[in-house]
Image: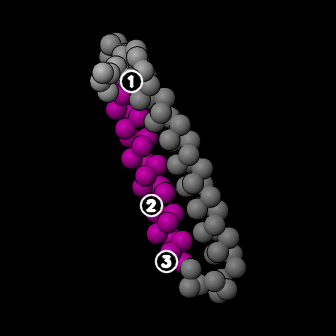
Amino acid sequence: MTTCMEMLPVVEEKTNHWELIVDEKDALKTDIKRLNAQATQAKMDLHDLAEDLPVGWENILDLANRTYAAYRDLTAARARLASFPGG
């Protein structure tokens, strides 16, 4: 009879603490790129909305909140990246 543990594939564990930090840092850099793109798009959408006023005025609050959240998340991710050894 086989146990569940015997059926699992063997995965090499990372024992080097620095490898884990580098992997996490790389993942965070990828996340920052995604967040930056979202924040930039929200900023452009808000700018476009402002140019078209008074048309679309009812979307101001929603778009402003989305833009605020995008930049809040981007700023937090950048702060996390800066907290890593070597920035």
Task: Please determine whether, in this image, residue 59 is positioned above or below residue 75.
Answer: below
> Mark 1, mark 3: which one is toward the viewer?
1
Tell me which amino acid carries mark 2. Answer: Ala
Neighbour tally class for label 2: few under 14, some 14-19, many 20 plus, Cα within 10 Å? some
Helix, strand or loop: magenta stretch:
helix
Q: Which residue is mark 1?
A: 8
Q: CA–CA distance between discs 1 and 3? A: 50 Å
> Which residue in the protein does label 3 denote?
61
Viewer-proximal residue, 78 or 24? 24
Can you give x and y, in whole percent of width and height, for residue 34 in the image? Answer: 56, 46
Q: Residue at x 40, y 17 (%)?
A: 10
| Dot 2 or dot 1, earlier in sequence | 1
Kind of residue at disc 1: Leu
The reply to whether residue 18 is visible in this rendering is: no
Disc 3 marks a residue whose amino acid type is Leu
Are the residues tagged 2 and 1 within 8 Å (C-beta)? no
Image point 38% across, 24% down: which residue?
8
Residue drawn 42% across the image and 55% down it: 72
Instruction: From the top left corner, tell me how far across and down residue 46 is, in percent.
Output: 60, 69
Q: CA distance from mark 3 to mark 2?
A: 12 Å
Classify 10 Å Cα crowding around label 3: few (below 14), some (14-19), many (20 and above): few
Q: Are marks 3 and 2 in contact (CB under 8 Å)?
A: no
* Numbered range of the magenta stretch: 60-87
Decide which of tag 3 and tag 2 comes sooner along the chain.
Answer: 3
Nearest to the observer: residue 74 or residue 9: 9
Could you say which is closer to the camera, residue 16 or residue 55? 16
Q: Picture quarter containing residue 50?
A: bottom right
Q: Mark 3: which secondary structure?
A: helix
* Residue picked out by circle 2: 69
The colouring scheme, among rainbow, by chain, secondary structure or one colour, is one colour
